Image (tube, rainbow, N blue to C red):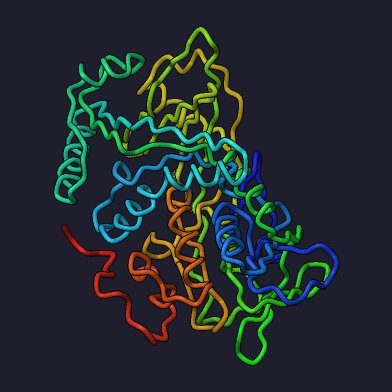
Amino acid sequence: MHSSQQSSPPSPREEPSPAAPGGSASQGYDVLVVGGGIIGLVTAWRAAQRGLRTALADPEPGGGAARVAAGMLAAVTELHHGEQTLLGLNLASAARYPAFVEELEEASGRDTGYRACGTLAVALDADDRAQLRELHALQTRSGLTSQWLTGRECRRLEPMLAPGVRGGLRVDGDHQIDPRRLAAALLTACERAGVVFHRAWVRRLSVVRDRAAGAVLADGAALGADRVVLAGGSLSGGLAGVPPEAVPPVRPVKGQVLRLAVPGPYAPFLSRTVRAVVRGSQVYLVPRENGELVVGATSEELGWDTTVTAGGVYELLRDAHALVPGITELPLTETRAGLRPCSPDNAPLLGPTVLPGLSLATGHHRNGVLLTPVTGDVLAAVLTGGDLPPEAAPFTPLRFSGAASRPPHPSASLEQPV
Ligand code: GLY
């Protein structure tokens, strides 16, 4: 949820959760969304489209982790052992992306920077190659499409790659979007759909007769709502007033990301996303059509720290340089760090909690941008009185509630081996 160009995030425990208001005590919303990152925005947009009177509380809607994220839609290249159930949700969302983008661009009049460019994951040494072969086997067993290429074939596709590339996986279905443009488009779409924005922090959840009933903003204004959706990214676990058994178990996982510019004479520098595991660390280069080249990302468990460090920048540049030596010629235009909201099983928390009236849309970890379309659809179904759709059933927050009041969906095992 939070991002910073330098360090010190705002104290999430003091203003527990992102949120809200604007002075007046608006009452009587059908839905109040707490948190205005891309997940909160898509939830509010979908709710408003369905005729629900919807408010969203966040001091800076459109901010958060989307300011930092590279925007890879990497369901296939970011597949991990033990995450086959999450893969189903990731693929469902990836499949919805083209229609989602078309609808959003039409609704907002804004370009989202969606680019169906594909991805090339490469290996730089024998260890990397063995790891990539393993990923290829996992993808094949999971019914996914990826193609093994020799180093020569990789360089034919992407001539800027290092001469030493030992092989790679071509994944034509893993695309990209510009998360900043996505957030701006969602913001406009929300405004056009009638979402009311309260630009302030939320101080606490209001609970009346054991039911979520709105929220109190930092200025003391009270917002009443029949249903509340907590979509506060990595800050979601800090909202006061949420009963302990309904508190989402999310923690921040820091990611440092760089932005470079590709001047005209160097273009096209890369034609698709290029990534690798270098010395055990993920590095990826995401080329935008507008000449921006995004290089990410560290993965650090450092609490709320969002300092951009010399070490983080050094490691990203070192690994990106090993992959594509020519990057040293490019202007470095921006460095940032953001916080991924991570749950205990790396999967999102979607839908109703044990507290009636309170739903969650958080915990998306590395997949927030990818999961934006499906999250909007899932929350819309829930907010209009429906059950959690089958594709989202494994991701019920009740799997962590301790109440065990409802077992996860039969196919819910996140540890299911292939
Ligand atoms: N999905 C890429 C990242 O979180 O770094």
Q: Residue furthest top?
A: 265
Question: Closer to the camera, 252 or 214?
Answer: 214
Horizontal side of 183 relative to 133 (left or right) equals: right
Q: Could you say which is closer to the camera, residue 71 or residue 195?
A: 195
368 lies above or below 203: above
Q: Position of residue 64 (x, y in %)?
A: 61, 50
Going 21% across and 37% down the picture, which residue do you hit? 146
Within the displayed image, which quadrant is ligand 1 positioned in?
Answer: top left
Res. 310 visible in picture: yes
Q: Residue furthest bottom?
A: 209
Q: Is residue 311 visible?
A: no
Q: Along the horizontal axis of the image, is 292 left or right of 212?
A: left
Residue at (54% x, 41% y) in the render: 179
Residue 55 point in image, percent of width and height: 69, 65
Which quarter of the image is occupied by the N terminus?
Answer: bottom right
User: Along the line of sight, which residue is nearer the eye, 229 or 324?
Assistant: 229
Residue that appears at 42% across and 46% down: 97
Where on the picture, by quarter, is residue 356? Answer: bottom right
Above or below, comparing residue 133 to residue 319 in the picture: below
Number of marks: 0
In the rendered view, tell whether residue 8 sits above or below residue 132.
below
Residue 77: image quadrant is top left
Question: Residue at image x 54%, y 25%?
Answer: 292
Image-based side of 264 in relation to 217, left or right: left
Q: Position of residue 402 (x, y in %)?
A: 41, 83
The front one of 341 and 209 is 209
Picture coordinates of residue 110 (x, y %)? 61, 38
Quadrant (top left, top right, bottom left, bottom right) of the C terminus: bottom left
